[in-house]
Image (spheres, rainbow, N blue to C red):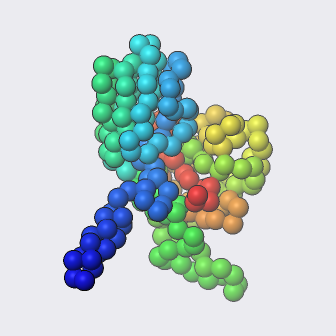
Amino acid sequence: MSIIRTAVFVLAATTAIVPGVGSAPVQVALVEDVSGHPAGAVLMDYLEPGRLIRLGPRDKIVLGYLRSCVRETITGGIVKVGTDESDVQSGKIERAKLPCDGARMLRAAEQPGPTAGVVFRGGGPPRTTDPQFTLFGSSPMLELRSPGTVVIERIDQSGERYVLDVGKAELGPAGFYDFAHTGKALVPGGAYRAAFAGRELVFKVDAEAKPGRTAIVGRLLRLAAPN
């Protein structure tokens, strides 16, 4: 009987620690740019560990790892997505470590409601006032997945507020809205609240953040509801 119990315990422990068993695959990287026709990934696609991407000799792909803040530009070869970086065979890779806060941003986006530093206003739902993460680009890339109204307002000073009615055409097939496409940018050093479809995130913009199409891994704002 003790042997059977031990075997059941080992099986349960193994199931608990194996990624993807009984849960959705862990998304570790985002396809930031694509050139050519790579097999296994498309622009703004999330990637899980173990995914294989096959590139032709002239195909190029840019991957941003959300937790390790590693950004890779890969030309040709076979790419195997890892947890923190890729394994590339028969191809060329340029790898850089960039400032980002992707791990904390993902944790905040995956929470069903506000976290620490909440306040109550007029008997309404609690709202967080403490920045949950930092963006290192001042033109956010908003992940929305569906059309709707986005409100971004500065909370450490008054006067700056954006109300964006984002339609299907502006989202594109991947469901992202890029501030950089319209020339908009937030103020470096500012603290903001973003609200969309009943969800809120509070963040700050790094004092050295630059506007425009900087690396997405450093300016991604995930407002879509968790899968």
Between 50 and 223, the one lying in front of the other is 50
For the question of whether residue 22 can be seen, the reply is yes
- Does residue 4 lie above or below 39 as drawn? below
Give the quadrant of residue 123. bottom right
Q: How many marks?
A: 0
Name the residue located 57 percent from the left edge and 72 percent from the top edge: 113
Q: Describe residue 147's horizontal placement relative to residue 11 as left or right.
A: right
Q: Position of residue 32 (x, y in %)?
A: 50, 34
Q: Residue furthest top?
A: 57
Q: Residue furthest front?
A: 1
Give the quadrant of residue 157. bottom right
Between 72 and 162, the one lying in front of the other is 72
Q: Position of residue 141 (x, y in %)?
A: 57, 44
- Does residue 28 lie above or below 31 as drawn? below
Q: Position of residue 103 (x, y in %)?
A: 40, 56
Q: Describe residue 153's horizontal placement relative to residue 51 as left or right.
A: right
